Image: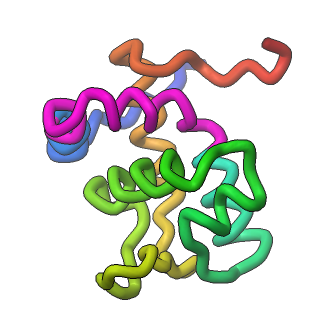
Amino acid sequence: MTQQVEPVDQELMQNIVSAKDGSERKFKTFTGSFYILKSALRYFSVKKGMSFTSSKVSDNFPVSAPVAGSSLKILDELGVVESRTRSSSPNRYMSEDVDLEKMEQIQEILIENFEIKEFNPEE
């Protein structure tokens, strides 16, 4: 039985390339903490069903607030999360606005392009 492979979302792929081109350092930080962020998004949106900020992510997961903040900004640009308010205080993201399916698509694109390794919990 062959596995059905969904076609790559070209617009999403282009947005990822744009994010990388915009700030390679920020993108490298994002890819380095990708699986932690994915876990955090699932935790806040599915398990807790509550809004979150970069500080809340860093309080609950092994990632610093600046890393969480810059990564959430990239995820906002990619349409995975949506900031409730834009202000000088840290952006608050609503759990119901988290697109975990798009996060899975991003993961596949990053793996295919050798930006991240496939998740292996034994490593």
Instruction: Please name the residue shown 55% across and 63% down the image.
Output: 54
Residue 98 in percent (x, y) is at: 50, 69
Query: Residue 67, relative to residue 111: is it above or below?
Result: below
Instruction: Please name the residue shown 64% across and 71% down the image.
Output: 45
Residue 20 is inside the magenta segment: yes
Query: Residue 84, relative to residue 65: is it above or below?
Result: below
Which residues are the magenta region?
A: 18-36
Residue 64 in percent (x, y) is at: 61, 47
> In this rendering, would 58 be left or right of 75?
right
Task: Name the one closer to the observer, 111 or 89.
Answer: 89
Residue 91 in percent (x, y) is at: 42, 75
Task: Name the one closer to the observer, 27 or 6.
Answer: 27
Residue 8 in percent (x, y) is at: 28, 34
Q: Quadrant of residue 16?
A: top left
Q: Quadrant of the N terminus?
A: top right
Give the dominant element type of the magenta stretch: helix, strand or loop: helix
Query: Residue 19, relative to residue 117: is it above or below?
Result: below
- Report the number of discs: 0
Instruction: Please name the residue shown 42% across and 42% down the image.
Output: 105
> In this rendering, would 104 be left or right of 18?
right
Instruction: Please name the residue shown 40% across and 19% down the image.
Output: 115
Task: Name the one closer to the observer, 8 or 41.
Answer: 41
Q: Quadrant of residue 41?
A: bottom right
Residue 63 is inside the magenta segment: no
Q: Quadrant of the C terminus?
A: top right
